[in-house]
Image: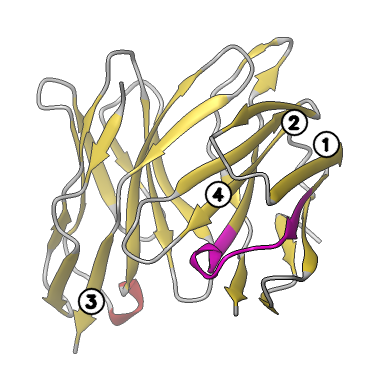
Amino acid sequence: ETGVTQTPRHLVMGMTNKKSLKCEQHLGHNAMYWYKQSAKKPLELMFVYSLEERVENNSVPSRFSPECPNSSHLFLHLHTLQPEDSALYLCASSQDILGGSSYNSPLHFGNGTRLTVT
Amino acid sequence: AQSVTQLDSQVPVFEEAPVELRCNYSSSVSVYLFWYVQYPNQGLQLLLKYLSGSTLVESINGFEAEFNKSQTSFHLRKPSVHISDTAEYFCAVSFSLYNFNKFYFGSGTKLNVKP
């Protein structure tokens, strides 16, 4: 399997539930990203992991908790969400470091998880 | 600070007509430029990119974009669109921080190709 895979594709959860989103990349990249896409708003960067270390946390509420156990996997743990958290959550990866130096490359996105909070 | 502006939220066009989707950016540092396309219920797919070299870049499906540094623009064009080009298109800029690439996206332009 190639590319970036996200599971589940759709998730409906109540405000008191705990769930996790999973992302797996098969591209050998060393950076992984979580984005939130809401209707009529630009993509919002949530978290960035580079070489398995969190390097960006964009003022995201603590009810979202990321985890990056290795360079191929990224999770987003969800708990006590609000209805306004309903959105498409996109995972992406890229090769941001090459030969020990920064390297510019495009983002490769998964198909996203459509989250609905009831 | 960096920002990306896509002035047109929706562009209706008839099949086989030309189209231009506009993108302007603002940046205090040198940036790289991208266009992404998003089809319904899918993630964003890279359409084309400008990193360096020729200011005119092309995609495999007939789109092209031209980097204009003086006008800080990166407009996307196609001389003849197909029904299958109906999608949402996002312009993005990026620059390298010391350990990752920071991306800024526009708010998107929905291209609706009519028969």
Image coloring type: secondary structure
Parent chain of label 4: A
Residue B33: which quarter of the image? top left
Tell me: B6 left or right of A73. left
Q: Name which residue lies at 31% across and 26% down.
A: B2
Alpha carbon separation for disc pair 2 and 4: 17 Å
Q: Position of residue B55 (x, y in %)?
A: 25, 28
In the image, residue B89 sits, relative to residue A118, either above or below, namely above
Element carrying mark 1: loop
Alpha carbon separation for disc pair 1 and 3: 38 Å
Name which residue type carries label 1.
Answer: Ser
Q: Name which residue lies at 37% across and 66% down.
A: A39
Residue bearing the label numbered 1: A71
Name which residue type carries label 4.
Answer: Tyr
In this view, the residue in front, A47 or B72, is A47
Q: Name which residue lies at 75% across and 31% down.
A: A30
Asked whether the beta carbons under mark 4 and mark 1 sit within 8 Å of each other, the answer is no
Residue bearing the label numbered 2: A30
Q: Are marks 3 and 4 on the same chain?
A: no
Parent chain of label 2: A
Residue B53 in magenta stretch: no
Q: Are marks 2 and 4 on the same chain?
A: yes
Name the disc covering residue B19, or none.
none
Name the disc covering residue B112, or none.
3
Residue B85: which quarter of the image? bottom left
Magenta segment, which residues? A75-89
Residue bearing the label numbered 4: A35
Residue A84 in magenta stretch: yes
Name which residue type carries label 2.
Answer: Asn
In the image, residue B74 sits, relative to residue B19, either above or below, namely above
Parent chain of label 1: A
Asked whether the beta carbons under mark 1 and mark 2 sit within 8 Å of each other, the answer is yes
